[in-house]
Image (cartoon, rainbow, N blue to C red):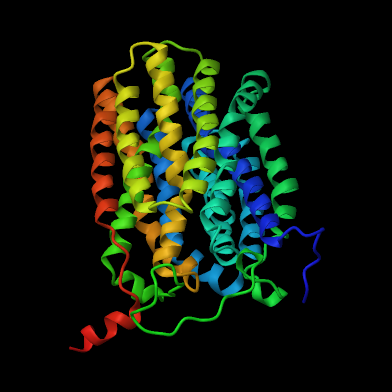
Amino acid sequence: MALRRTGRIFYGWWIVAVGFGLEVLIGILLFHIYGAYVVLFQREFGWSKTMLSAAFALARAESGMLGPVQGWLTDHFGPRALIQVGMAIFGIGYVLLSQVSSAVTFFLAFFVIALGASLGGYLPTGVALVNWFRRRRAMALAITGTGMPVGGFLTPLVVSALERFGWRWTAFASGLVILAAGIPMGSVVRHRPEPYAEWPDGEPPAAPAAPGPSRGASAAVDFTAREALRTQAFWLISLGHGSALLVVSTVMVHMLAHVTERLGYSLQQGAQVVALATGVQVVAQLVGGGWAGDRFSKRGLVVACMVAHAFSLLLLAFATSFWMVAAFGVLHGIAWGVRGPLMSAIRADYFGSAAFGTISGFSSVIVMMGMMAGPLVAGILADRTGSYRPGFVVLAGLAALGSVCFWLAKRPLPPYAREPRSRG
């Protein structure tokens, strides 16, 4: 079956465009706006920071537990089906959220939202892009990933809708937008280029290299999931990625509450900080995560990003004026932007694309522990101490330790080089 091509544009770039659109939807309607919902739910229902953090944490735990199954399903049935099902569930979840009246119904609605965003988001899109790109892989992932910060950049628009029309009508409208846009976008995605007479990057393959340990580091080496889990690199990358998401998830859930309660800014001013951080993230993602990621050491770039993650959270913790909050936004945006696309790119470089979905799914079990723990730690300590500062300092230290994990995550020996050792 041949793909319908428009001009001379490589079809993989259409998948990049769709991935970008899906990331915008998830970014603007879930990740970057959740902090605003936290503020409004506290005002209306009086729910604690711990409870609202727990909802986000449980949703991330669900995503992590689902990861291996989702990865296997993506590798075996293709990303298109998962994206379309996920977007349908994601949209329905927001319709349900518009009707919540208790903590129980909120937890159930948010569980549905998180399930849909997980099924239709990062992992299946990443699997498709890893298969459609090799030489330009980091750039393809970076362009797609800019959808998340673009969604954050548009956060003030959703905040305006929340303040003007209320969170119920905004949630209901969000669900309709997801259903109308997300499902059709998913239909564009294709799993691999070969069945459509295409090649990765749109370039015919070079002559195959001779097998054996002498193959260069840039040659494609495909690990099975079992083989990847036996390597030290798999665990170090997963732990490092999880430590990064300690910071990212904490900022998503608690930054707006921190700047409105401790520093006295309005919800709109807080949303402007989100927009600043995500605007910087877009540039950093394309230049650092994309252009530089295809040319320089991905591992070295990620180590620097982890240090930046830690310093940015310390800036937010000790902020006493707006310039410190703005400096946090810039540094956080650079760290997240450069690091984001390199997470998938470095796994694909190390382990290949054949079982990329399953490998990423198993990794997500560890990664999501970080995304789950960050908001919980910050929320519990804030409820007990009356300040976000202790939680932010603890999490900044853990993020700094993540840089050590990536520094130690050397490229593993290919399976054929390790087999003789295992027999001896």
| Residue closest to the eye, 257 or 350 | 350
From the top left corner, tell me how far across and down residue 13 is, in percent. 67, 56
| Residue closest to the eye, 308 or 98 | 308
Residue furthest to the left in view is: 424
From the top left corner, tell me how far across and down residue 295 is, in percent. 46, 52
> In this rendering, would 240 be left or right of 135?
left
Is residue 71 positioned above or below 295 on the image?
A: below
Q: Quadrant of residue 198?
A: bottom right
Is residue 45 positioned above or below 339 on the image?
A: above
Could one spot residue 6 in this view of the protein?
yes
Q: Quadrant of the N terminus?
A: bottom right
| Residue closest to the eye, 305 or 203 | 203
Q: Quadrant of the C terminus?
A: bottom left
Could one spot residue 46 in this view of the protein?
no
Please give the name of the residue rendered at 44% of the width and 85% of the height, measured from the top-left corner: 210
Is residue 412 positioned above or below 329 on the image?
A: below
Please give the name of the residue rendered at 30% of the width and 38% of the height, measured from the top-left corner: 307
From the top left corner, tell me how far across and down residue 315 is, in percent. 32, 23
Please give the name of the residue rendered at 32% of the width and 64% of the height, measured from the top-left corner: 411
From the top left corner, tell me how far across and down residue 37 is, in percent. 52, 29
Please give the name of the residue rendered at 66% of the width and 24% of the height, measured from the top-left corner: 161
| Residue closest to the eye, 388 or 130 | 130
> In this rendering, would 397 be left or right of 349?
left
Q: Quadrant of residue 268?
A: top right
